[in-house]
């Protein structure tokens, strides 16, 4: 059985994530997804997620391409995960190209897959922020826009 692993935050799950998972699964028989914990996202990546780790894990477990979801607690665990989970292929988006080539020394094939160009979580967050801004002011959810021209 050929085992594939990928890592990510997977916040605001979208079709770009699904494309990555589908292509990763096609590289083997068993797909492991390491999801960044809330603490790792905040302390190391300086990112606040919309969904908690448990919520993101539950979403990923519902995707047919995903066989196992594990927590990513730190940058260093990738090397040990390759051995603990008997990984054959490590997959990441091509925005990380070259950053994980050191895993080849662990006997793992490293593959960087092209991103789905028109979608990203950052773009979704940016678009939602812009959509909620009126005349340069951010609106709260309880405010209404007066569309009456009078």
Image (cartoon, rainbow, N blue to C red):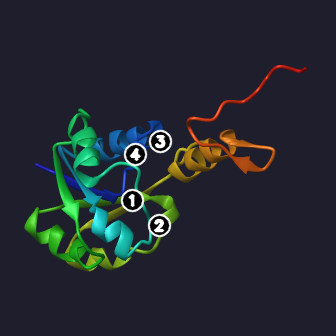
Can you identify the residue that label 3 sits on?
A: 16
Image position, residue 127 (x, y; %):
64, 43
Please say if the residues under marks 3 and 4 sit with CB atoms less than 8 Å apart: yes
Q: Residue at x 30, y 76 (%)?
A: 75
Mark 3 or mark 4: which is in front? 3
Image position, residue 148 (x, y; %):
83, 19
| Side (left or right) of 1 relative to 94 | left
The residues bearing labels 2 and 4 have C-alpha atoms spaced at a distance of 13 Å
Quadrant into which the C terminus falls:
top right
Structural crowding at the residue carrying mark 1, measured as other residues with C-alpha within 10 Å and reported as few (<14), some (14–19) or many (≥20) = many
Residue 92's tag is 1
| Side (left or right) of 56 relative to 140 | left
Please say if the residues under marks 2 and 4 sit with CB atoms less than 8 Å apart: no
Can you identify the residue that label 4 sits on?
A: 20
Mark 3 falls on what kind of element? Answer: helix
Mark 2 or mark 3: which comes first in sequence? 3
Please say if the residues under marks 2 and 1 sit with CB atoms less than 8 Å apart: yes
Can you identify the residue that label 2 sits on?
A: 96
Q: Residue furthest front?
A: 150
Is residue 76 shown above or below 58?
below
Structural crowding at the residue carrying mark 2, measured as other residues with C-alpha within 10 Å and reported as few (<14), some (14–19) or many (≥20) = few
Q: Residue at x 46, y 73 (%)?
A: 98
Structural crowding at the residue carrying mark 4, measured as other residues with C-alpha within 10 Å and reported as few (<14), some (14–19) or many (≥20) = many
The residues bearing labels 4 and 1 have C-alpha atoms spaced at a distance of 8 Å
Instruction: Answer yes or no: is residue 129 visible.
Output: yes
Tell which of 48 and 25 is nearer to you. 48
Mark 2 falls on what kind of element? Answer: helix
The residues bearing labels 2 and 3 have C-alpha atoms spaced at a distance of 15 Å
Residue 112's tag is none
Mark 1 falls on what kind of element? Answer: strand
Q: Residue at x 63, y 47 (%)?
A: 129
């Amino acid at each position: 059985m050929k085992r594939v692993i990928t890592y990510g935050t997977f916040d605001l799950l979208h079709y770009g994530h699904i494309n990555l998972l589908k292509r990763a699964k096609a590289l083997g028989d068993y797909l492991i997804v390491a999801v960044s914990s809330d603490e790792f996202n905040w302390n190391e990546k300086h990112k606040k997620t919309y969904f908690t780790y448990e919520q993101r894990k539950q979403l990923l477990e519902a995707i047919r391409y995903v066989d196992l979801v594990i927590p990513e607690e730190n940058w260093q665990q990738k090397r040990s995960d390759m051995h603990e989970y008997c990984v054959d292929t490590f997959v990441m988006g091509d925005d990380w190209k070259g950053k994980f080539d050191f895993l080849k020394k662990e006997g793992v094939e490293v593959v960087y897959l092209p991103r789905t160009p028109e979608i990203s979580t950052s773009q979704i967050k940016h678009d939602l922020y812009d959509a909620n801004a009126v005349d340069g002011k951010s609106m709260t959810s309880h405010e209404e826009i007066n569309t009456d021209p009078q």
